[in-house]
Image (spheres, rainbow, N blue to C red):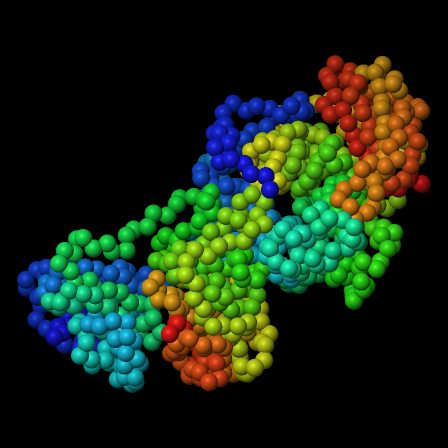
Amino acid sequence: MKTISFAFILIISGLTGFGEEQPKRIPAGYAVTTVKTPEGTSLGVGGMEFAPNGNLFICTREGEVWEYSPKKEKWSLFADGLHEALGIWIDPKSSETYVIQRPEITKLIDTDKDGRADLYESFNAGWGVTDNYHEYAFGLVRDSKGNFYGTLNTSLSWPGWARSKKWDIARVWTKGYKDTEGKMGRAAKYRGWGFQVTPEGKFVPLASGMRSPAGIGINKDDELFFTDNQGDWEASSSLHHIVKGRFHGHPSSLTDHPDFKGKDLNAIAIEDYEKLWKRPAVWIPHGELANSPGEPIFDYSGGKFGPFAGQMFIGDQSRSNIMRVSLDKVGGDYQGVIFDFVNRLQTGCIRHVFGKDGTLWVGQTGRGWGSAGGKEFGLQQVKWDGKTTPFSMHDVKLTKKGFRITFTKPADDSLAKDAKNYSIERWGYHYHPKYGSPKTNVTKEQPSSVKVSKDGLEVQIGVTLEKSRVYKLNLGAIAAKDGSEMANAFAWYTLNQLKD
Amino acid sequence: MKSIIPLFALLPLALAPLALAKPDYEISLGTLHGQLRFSPEAFAVKPGSSIRLNFENSDEMIHNLILAKGDGKTINRLAESALKLGEKGMEMGLVPKDSSILASIGLVQPGKKASVEFTAPKEIGDYPYVCTFPGHSLTMRGLMKVVADPDSVDLSPVKEVSASTTPRNGVIEVGDDPRVIRVHVAGIDSGRSIAVGLPGGANYLFDAEKLMIRTGWTGGFINVMRDRRGRGGGLCAILGDKFQVGTSEFPLRTGSPDKNPKTRFSGYSRKGNPTFIYEVNGVRIEQTATGHPAKKGLTLGFRADKPKRDLFYLIESKDLLVSTTAGKWHSDKGYVQVPAKEASEFFISIEQK
């Protein structure tokens, strides 16, 4: 465990409110603002949602719910005593407030309207939870039909936790590895599952194989996505599309799968698990882009947040950056591209919400695992100035022979048409019980063909295409027609399936 | 030697002349809302001084007050005698006839006031006071300290509670309002437990899965440091002296004491004294608990919503004293049985022998 000295924390919290230092990487037209958090409170953000009255509600890892009035810049405590509250959902009409915490989904009701919740109603507690600290319950999103969704962390399965004998539970294929290598297991029901809770409060297990699924998001078509963290069975951090019945790779959760009832999970070959495994829609390469991604959120601001309307944003706890994702539906399934967007903020970014004005609010925590940003917790905003178009790759889509890359504004034609200005690297990952995977089959190349559109907004490149690979495209040498530099040089495209 | 002036009581017990002279001491006594506690729980006076005791019942329940010469055992006897008054009890303000009583105020309705004037004993010492309303006596008690120099007596000093709700040292303190916090406690194997800290230093741990009180404790509340700082991974520590209240899983049952009931935890209310709400075989139950900083015991308050069958509350009674305001405690069988028709509200006191 990383220990941060108190003095150090005091010093860095002291900086809040001073002239804002901007991140090293941030597209032109965007700026970061730090919001002052309540005095004397550790505000490790676990969930954020706007209420109909325009106030922002934040639930925290410390178990509190704070209400923030952006107009008055005032904080008030709405609820406390929860256990690591990692998601919140507020009805946009009725203001009904639900949080997800380790043991349950709780409806918080302020019966006497004094601004403090006084009735903590248990809405659903359909999953098992022990005192294993890794048994996080993440959320909370709701679809148009009123179903809630969340994800459940596996149990940390090494002798260090709880100093008890109950740690060695449902670990799969760990013989030959040291106990201290951070293997995850299943100490209680539905650890490692994504779930639905119906409007009537019924718990429905949806998809298994999750390890540390720290963020769940939903798009306007009620499609669900979650991020997972690199670890055992997880080659790298990743983004997944949740569909009922899918198995996302970590086998401990199969203990609660009806098809595996009574079976010895250690007797099933790794290759057989691999066949069941639904590959992530987007790999988020560990170490170069993210180490522990949080909540995915879609930009439905209609352009108020700049030229990336409809795309997804994901923050990372460890690297403290914000990434941008554009999904590509190929062969009926999602895959897609991810970019580094803002790098980096003051501390780990795990929760996000868009304000009505298109401001992206970033809820932060770095506690326990440390974060590149350095601060322990916080709240920041990323704003677009409403006029500046940064030069950036807007999207990368798979074609039959390579990729079609679009730009936010015209690229310099002479730079864009030169194949030497593109470097492309692809690799694969192992599927195995070990902690993370090195890159496998690393191959570098330059495009075999480059075709720039007349308006300079699009380029088609010819590339050797191979399934189950991550393609890293480096376009750092290409500038805009107006001379501006590329905001983010790299694009990482996950190619699971080829185009027919 | 009692002189009673009930300004408001169900029935005035005596009519004494209004005091003309100003007493040496005018003591204001109130109640902690929803806590079954007096406030303050101690006051000090000089030997032989004249006292006017003003009692204001700011609670939502009826209370009385008896001040006596004696100790904890005397208080227990007075409470027992009050229960035995039967039909006459209410008329008598639940004040039994007992030579130990120095002063008393009969039943005072919620929101009402009453006073009594009396002379303090000449002997230096502690004189307890208690509410003898059924179920209240375990926790509603205090001490009149008769001392030569009352100003020198340290009476439950005002506790400074950190303004931070997430203190760096992890020590959660209890001020004027109860604290309710989800915790994993060292030595107690539970993923769904809720610690309750009541003002003044009585605390307990409610298991929302097994619907039982895992432990009670007096003194400090809880340290969440190891669970809520850094990565977590450690467990919370209870900061006081633990005591057992003898319950095993699903202690409240309906119809039969032998069968694990079908239950659902519904949540809790934090208005006044924290109230846990759950269902047992379809019957909605509300449960509160009160304790006393100086007593190793809890008084559990129950409200059952129209049960059709008798209620049972299981208690492993080894080293425990159990009493109930409804039904009967069967020490041989290890349960309190409460007839369905008496279960709309009752209290069970469990304390260590």
User: Camera-side residue: A249 or B35?
Assistant: A249
- Left or right: where A15 falls relative to B1: right
Residue A76 lies, in percent from the top left, at 45, 44
User: Camera-side residue: B204 or A202?
Assistant: B204
User: Camera-side residue: A349 or A393?
Assistant: A349
- Left or right: where B18 falls relative to A299: left
User: Camera-side residue: A181 or B153?
Assistant: A181
At horizontal 81% and vertical 58% (from top left) the residue drawn is A266
At horizontal 26% and vertical 77% (from top left) the residue drawn is B78
- Left or right: where A431 falls relative to A64: right
At horizontal 19% and vertical 76% (from top left) the residue drawn is B100
At horizontal 81% and vertical 64% (from top left) the residue drawn is A263
Residue A196 lies, in percent from the top left, at 69, 57
A383, above or below B253, in the image = above
Q: Can the viewer see residue A444 in this picture?
A: yes
Which image quadrant: the N terminus of chain B?
bottom left
Which image quadrant: the C terminus of chain B?
bottom left
Point out the residue furthest to the left here: B21
